[in-house]
Image (cartoon, rainbow, N blue to C red):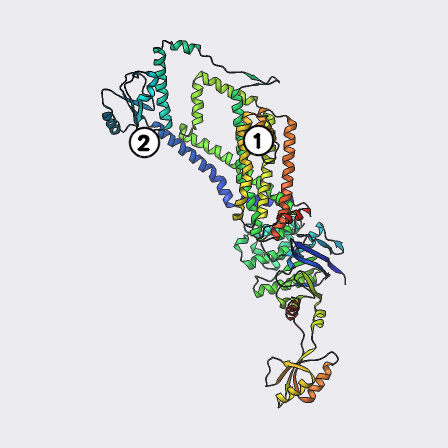
């Protein structure tokens, strides 16, 4: 699979402060790429480098195989975290203006705006001023403006903040729709459940360095600890627990069950097979629950950042 | 991609459609006219009042000196003590009491003349009375010393030197005054324009930061295009407002003067009207008109437009740079002085140095320095400046303007990245390199 965006060894210093330190990334074409990291890690600086707002001190950026240059402005759609529109301008006028700045002609922009405004059911806002809209409403307008010129690369910085659950879902569907139509999406957020749900690839940046990246499934595989959560029905919980503890490393598990079962997390060493464990357990008790523990993005995030610090 | 026309259009429409802008465009001339009317009315009231001065002349030397005029009437007292005269003056509610003691030596007259009043008298009143006394007593003194006044008057010679440049161009003192007025008006206009609309540009630059749209815009266009667009768009809006003021103002003035007649005449107009009445001053008006036609009109108009535009653009790019460097409007105060200073300096140099010596070192140097050249050069041109000098000055001005816009654009980039933190000079230089 080819990469739409490649960031190679990019560094950026502000005075004595290092915002990015030798960061490299590859965003596959057609993927949804999660750019994660704690506050102040350098995510926004990286996004600004991709948007040519900031020039890197060293390193290079390639979009679709070409060195990033001015003409690529129209290939990128950027929804910054610091959102804003001209407050005293009318919605339609403003959207037209911003679309024209991205290289659309007026008629093109009008057509597409009509399509998108109808799609998001905001057609009757055309003549309203931004200051008359609520924050969420303004965000919708801004979303339309970001995607209107049908860029190859969409960059969303916290796209769901300020939206109610219904609108957040609407925007999520739109992002998936855009991806289906061929766009590549970079997605920067602190909401791990949306990363879990949407992202194919992730990269984790902490303290100006990239500390983790890859396919989400690969990352999870890499971080799973071969631990199984089990529920066992037996007459004597304490006796069985002792027996298992002699053979495996265990800890107490917490999950909801109907009966007073023995609930354990059992960690296997890498030679043991899950089936062997299951066979062993069925020989001892009735197994009501057997699940492999896959780490969530949230857990990976916290674990990696903590150990990195 | 060139988005400049698009940005200019947006900035222009945004300014012109602004409610405050529309209201100010219409209201300002109305307020101005009302102000003129009020001032004219008030001065009329003041003029109508007749001042009464009580005079107690014990010397008897000044019998025919004080004659009633339109604005002042004199109440001459005789055979009364000073104290009685004071009481009488107070009761009569007159402006004051002039007391002249009996005295012999005319040269010591000052010691015997005193003015009593409730409040200290106005400067014009004092100098008026002093003038009358001096004239009368000098005449008396001359007579006493056996000198004939008529002889002196006849012997006095007045000189009005004719001036001519080597090119054969005739000039005169009045010429200088006309030139000064012309240059001064041009300089003052530029000054006002810069202060009013420079601020507007600065606010419009800050607006994008406070509304947080800056990141969207800056990811679409180059900062220099954005800044240039803002400066040009706002300037056009400013010119629009100025034209509206001019048109509306003259229409209103015409209407008001038709309705109220002579009342709204300014003192200058009255002066001119009075002047026409007397042949001597009539000739002077003729001179003024002649001096006006003698000005290098074409050069002046072309230079005025070019230097006005150049100077305005330069200063507005400085305002834009300030807007780019700060986060909100309150932070701009400290940067204002360095901008206003050269402007004020230019006006002072224009008024004091250029008039004294239009082609001296100081005038010449300051007509090249870009921050002062628009004002100083405009004031120098009526006195005749070679075209090549004007061109060089203009070239420096335009180059500086381009440099400032470019510089402001760099600051802009740094400014949006440094929320709440001032960029260091080192950092600025680094950014400029990119």
Q: Position of residue A67 (x, y in %)?
A: 74, 53
Q: Quadrant of residue B296?
A: top right
Same chain under badges 2 and 1? The reply is: yes
Between B306 and B153, the residue placed more toward the observer is B153
What residue occupies the far bottom of the structure in this picture?
A: A235
Quarter of the rendering containing residue B342: top right
Q: Nearer the viewer, residue A1 or B251?
A: A1
Q: Disc 2 versus disc 1: distance between alpha carbons? A: 45 Å
**Which element is circle 1 on?**
helix
- First in sequence, mark 2 or 1: give its number: 2
Q: Please name the residue shown 51% across and 21% down the image.
A: B288
Q: Chain of mark 2?
A: B
Q: Residue B119: which disc?
A: 2
In-front residue for pair A13/B107: B107
The quadrant holding residue A159 is bottom right
Q: Is residue B377 above or below residue A56?
A: above
The residue located at (64%, 63%) in the rendering is A37
Q: Please tell me how crowded label 2 is: few (under 14), some (14-19), or many (20+) other residues with Cα within 10 Å.
A: few
**Chain label for disc 1:** B
Estimate the x, y position of residue B36 in percent, counting from the top left: 43, 33
Disc nearest the viewer among 2 and 1 = 2
């Amino acid at each position: 699979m080819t990469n739409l965006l490649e960031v190679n060894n990019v560094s950026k210093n502000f005075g004595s402060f290092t915002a990015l330190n030798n960061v490299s990334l590859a965003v596959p074409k057609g993927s949804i790429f999660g750019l994660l990291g704690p506050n102040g890690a350098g995510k926004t600086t990286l996004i600004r480098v991709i948007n040519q707002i900031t020039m890197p001190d060293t390193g290079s950026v390639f979009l679709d195989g070409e060195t990033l240059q001015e003409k690529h402005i129209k290939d990128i759609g950027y929804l910054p975290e610091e959102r804003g529109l001209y407050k005293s301008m009318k919605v339609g006028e403003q959207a037209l203006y911003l679309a024209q700045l991205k290289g659309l002609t007026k008629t093109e922009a009008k057509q597409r705006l009509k399509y998108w405004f109808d799609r998001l059911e905001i057609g009757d806002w055309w003549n309203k001023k931004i200051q008359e809209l609520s924050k969420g409403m303004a965000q919708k307008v801004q979303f339309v403006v970001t995607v209107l010129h049908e860029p190859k690369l969409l960059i969303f910085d916290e796209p769901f903040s300020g939206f109610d659950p219904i609108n957040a879902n609407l925007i999520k569907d739109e992002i998936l729709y855009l991806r289906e139509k061929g766009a590549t999406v970079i997605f920067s957020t602190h909401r791990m459940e949306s990363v879990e749900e949407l992202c194919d690839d992730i990269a984790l940046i902490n303290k100006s360095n990239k500390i983790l990246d890859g396919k989400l499934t690969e990352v999870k595989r890499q971080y799973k600890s071969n631990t199984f959560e089990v529920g066992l029905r037996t007459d004597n919980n304490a006796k069985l627990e002792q027996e298992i503890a002699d053979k495996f490393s265990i800890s107490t598990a917490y999950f909801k069950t109907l009966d007073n079962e023995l609930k354990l997390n059992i960690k296997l060493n890498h030679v043991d097979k899950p089936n062997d464990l299951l066979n062993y357990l069925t020989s001892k008790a009735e197994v009501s629950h057997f699940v492999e523990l896959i780490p969530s993005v949230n857990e990976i995030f916290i674990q990696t950042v903590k150990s990195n610090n | 991609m060139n988005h400049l026309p698009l940005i200019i259009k947006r900035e222009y429409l945004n300014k012109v459609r602004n409610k405050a802008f529309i209201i100010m465009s219409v209201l300002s001339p109305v307020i101005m006219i009302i102000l003129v009317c009020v001032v004219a009315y008030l001065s009329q009231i003041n003029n109508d009042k007749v001042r009464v001065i009580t005079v107690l002349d014990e010397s008897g030397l000044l019998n025919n000196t004080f004659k009633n005029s339109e604005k002042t009437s004199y109440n001459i007292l005789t055979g009364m003590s000073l104290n009685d005269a004071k009481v009488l003056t107070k009761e009569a509610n007159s402006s004051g009491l002039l007391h002249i003691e009996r005295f012999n030596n005319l040269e010591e007259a000052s010691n015997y003349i005193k003015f009593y009043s409730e409040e200290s008298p106005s400067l014009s009143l004092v100098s008026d009375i002093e003038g009358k006394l001096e004239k009368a007593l000098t005449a008396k003194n001359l007579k006493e010393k056996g000198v004939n006044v008529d002889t002196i008057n006849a012997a006095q010679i007045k000189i009005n030197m004719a001036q001519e440049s080597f090119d054969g161009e005739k000039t005169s003192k009045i010429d200088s005054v006309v030139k000064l007025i012309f240059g001064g008006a041009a300089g003052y206009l530029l000054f006002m324009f810069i202060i009013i609309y420079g601020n507007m540009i600065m606010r419009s630059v800050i607006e994008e930061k406070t509304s947080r749209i800056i990141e969207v815009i800056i990811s679409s266009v180059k900062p220099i295009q954005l800044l240039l667009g803002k400066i040009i768009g706002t300037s056009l809006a400013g010119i629009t407002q100025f034209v509206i003021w001019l048109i509306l103002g003259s229409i209103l003035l015409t209407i008001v003067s038709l309705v109220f007649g002579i009342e709204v005449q300014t003192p200058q107009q009255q002066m001119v009207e009075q002047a026409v009445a007397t042949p001597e001053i009539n000739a002077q008006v003729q001179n003024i008109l002649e001096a006006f036609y003698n000005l290098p009109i074409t050069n002046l108009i072309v230079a005025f437009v070019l230097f006005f535009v150049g100077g305005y653009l330069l200063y507005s790019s400085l305002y834009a740079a300030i807007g780019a460097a700060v986060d909100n409007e309150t932070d701009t105060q400290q940067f204002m002085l360095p901008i206003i200073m050269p402007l004020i300096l230019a006006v002072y140099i224009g008024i004091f140095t250029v008039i004294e010596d239009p082609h001296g070192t100081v005038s010449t140097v300051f007509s090249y320095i870009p921050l002062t050249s628009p004002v100083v050069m405009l004031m120098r041109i009526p006195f005749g400046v070679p075209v090549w000098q004007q061109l060089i000055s203009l070239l420096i001005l335009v180059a500086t303007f381009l440099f400032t816009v470019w510089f402001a654009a760099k600051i802009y980039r740094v400014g949006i990245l440094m929320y709440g933190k001032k960029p260091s000079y080192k950092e600025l230089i680094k950014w400029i390199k990119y």
